[in-house]
Image (cartoon, rainbow, N blue to C red):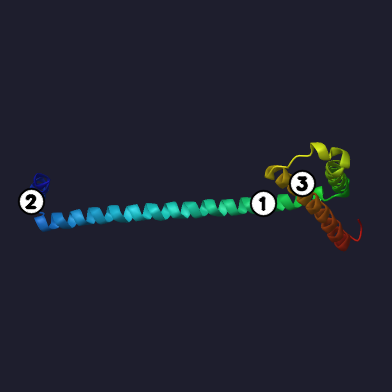
Amino acid sequence: MSSNTETLQAKGAAFGISSVDTTARAALVWSSFVLAFLQSICSAVLALNGVRLLLGLTSLAFADTAIGLMKRFHADWIRMPMIAIALLGTILNIAVLLHFQRLRNRPASQWRRRQRSPHEIRMETLQWVISILTLVAIAVEESIHFYWHSTL
């Protein structure tokens, strides 16, 4: 390291530059490097902000597209069959659950009745909850649709 400094000092002396000038020049070189590094970091941050802006504009465009899609999906030609299928599926599911309960509680099936596992109980409860939530969602959707559009 000292040989490099001595070489720089010798070259500087050949051009009339003292060792103090060489140290100042090294400080200038390093400060230029640090400032260039900071500038590149700043450029990277600005580029990332540009990417964020691009992502924001893209998400805004997709949101507008999503709103357009929602308006098209909210058209009666697709909304009514979807509600009808959801309603029929829920009614069928509730009918099957009630039928299972009726079969389990019949006197003729008491001799083969076994204790249900916690998993079976949880799954049946989950089916009941999902069926009831589906009916509530259909009722809410229809009431909001009637409120906004005055038609079912």
On the image, the x and y values in percent for residue 74 come to: 82, 51
Q: Is residue 18 visible?
A: no
- Between disc 1 and disc 3, the foreground one is 3
Q: Secondary structure at mark 1?
A: helix
Q: Tell me, yes or no, whether the two marked residues, 1 and 3, touch with CB atoms within 8 Å.
A: no
Mark sitting earlier along the chain (2/3): 2
Figure quadrant of the C terminus:
bottom right
Residue sitting farthest toward the top: 112
Q: What's the distance in space between the residues labelled 2 and 3, CA to CA?
A: 91 Å
Q: Is 140 or 108 nearer to us in this picture?
A: 108
For mark 1, what is the residue? 61
Callout 3: helix, strand or loop? Answer: helix
User: How would you rate the neighbour count of disc 3 (Cα within 10 Å): few for under 14, some for 14-19, many for 20 or more?
Assistant: some
> Which of the two discs, 1 and 3, labels the residue nearer the N terminus?
1
Please state which amino acid type lies under the numbered disc 2.
Ala
Instruction: Tell me the residue at 88%/49% (across/down).
Output: 76
Task: Name the residue: 53% across, 51% down.
Answer: 51
Determine whether, in the image, residue 101 is placed left or right of residue 120.
right
User: Residue 13 bears which disc, if any?
Assistant: 2
Q: On the rendered structure, is 148 left or right of 63?
A: right
Q: Amino acid at mark 1?
A: Ala
Location of residue 55 in the rendering, given as x and y in whole percent from the top left corner: 58, 51
